[in-house]
Image: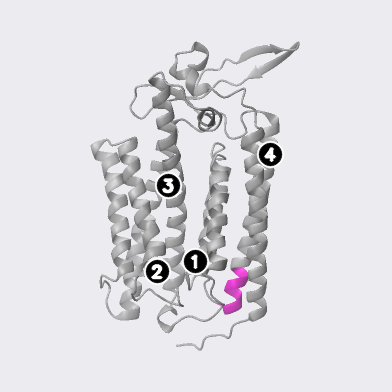
Amino acid sequence: MTVAAATNEHLASISNVLIYSSMAVYTLAFFAYIAEWLFGSRSKVGRTAAALTDRPEARRTAGAPAVTVKKAGGTAVLERPEVVVRSAAGARDVPDGPGAHGGDEQGDLYGRIAISLTVLAFLVELAGVVARAASVQRAPWGNMYEFNITFSTVAVGVYLVLLALRKNVRWLGLFLTTTVLLDLGLAVTVLYTASDQLVPALHSYWLYIHVSTAILCGAVFYVGAVATILYLFKDAYENKLAGGGKPGTFADSVLDRLPAAASLDKFAYRVNAAVFPLWTFTIIAGAIWAGDAWGRYWGWDPKETWSFITWVAYAGYLHARATAGWKGRKAAYLALIAFGCWLFNYYGVNIFVSGKHSYAGV
């Protein structure tokens, strides 16, 4: 066993400053996302209502090449064709909303500022995580504080990657920065642990493999959970419109800007399905590490048990979608139960339950 390196308090202090600095920038990004929602034009929303009331102009298919030309004060305004998707039940066609910016330049400007601030906050927080790792010369997830700051960094990274791959996930920004600020606030207050070395059982290369994949899986599961929650709200909104009801001002100005319920449902399913094999590998890697550290591969430790429960819950969700044809609200409830299991495994087991995985105080 190699002798653990001493803690570099200067780097640990720099890490703390960077984490607090990232929180300040995330706060600015949060307000920029709020501005995007508030000041984006509301004149271009109402697409869901138009589709569900059979307005011809709202039922153009996604592949239609035509554009609508409107005159506004003598100036021709070109409007892009609306994207219409088939709902999960196949009963109605509903267009994706224009996004938080409401489809106008002012809202889009605030959104671009918000994204720029999010990128800056991500880089500052990432530097803080790296400085924390350098202060003890190990992976920066040896306790709950380190796990939290790394998890929020990876969650934002997943959002930025998705944003680069597809242009219609900016609606995640406000919800992401809100929860990241809550996560970091909890980390620097309740969960903060001074930079220190690990217990002997954690000195293994499996710390880099097992815990890093667990963090990545949790970040992707989180994105899927946000999409699932928004799907439930959007689906209720669409159902109310389809039944002839009149939603309130909040629904008209916020929910109608989101992607269609069917799009949110499909997005949540795809991200959960994509990361599930990695979660399977995470559990297997943990079992191999347990065999090296404790001489047994599986002992029904609380963390092991709840990792397996989470795996079963997500497997049940994916199996129901693939074989029983479950889509929509029933599948969404299963997905949220599965994410709830992951959250309890993340917070509940580590903080409130005693076991071999309880290290460094929390």
In three-dimensional space, the C-alpha distance between marks 1 and 4, rounded to whole angstroms, equals 31 Å
The range drawn in magenta is 130-137
The prevailing secondary structure element of the residues shown in magenta is helix
Q: Which residue is farthest right?
A: 74
Which numbered mark, 2 or 3, is in the foreground of this view?
2
Q: Is residue 329 above or below residue 226?
A: above
In three-dimensional space, the C-alpha distance between marks 3 and 1, rounded to whole angstroms, equals 19 Å
Q: Is residue 173 magenta?
A: no
Residue at (68%, 47%) from the top-left corner? 116
Name the residue type under label 1.
Phe
Q: Is residue 237 above or below residue 284?
A: above
Q: Which residue is mark 3?
A: 225
Lower position in the chain sequence, tag 3 or tag 4 = 4
Indicate the secondary structure of the residue bearing disc 4.
helix
Q: Which residue is mark 2?
A: 350
Q: Is residue 132 magenta?
A: yes
Residue 139 placement (x, y as % from top left)? 52, 72
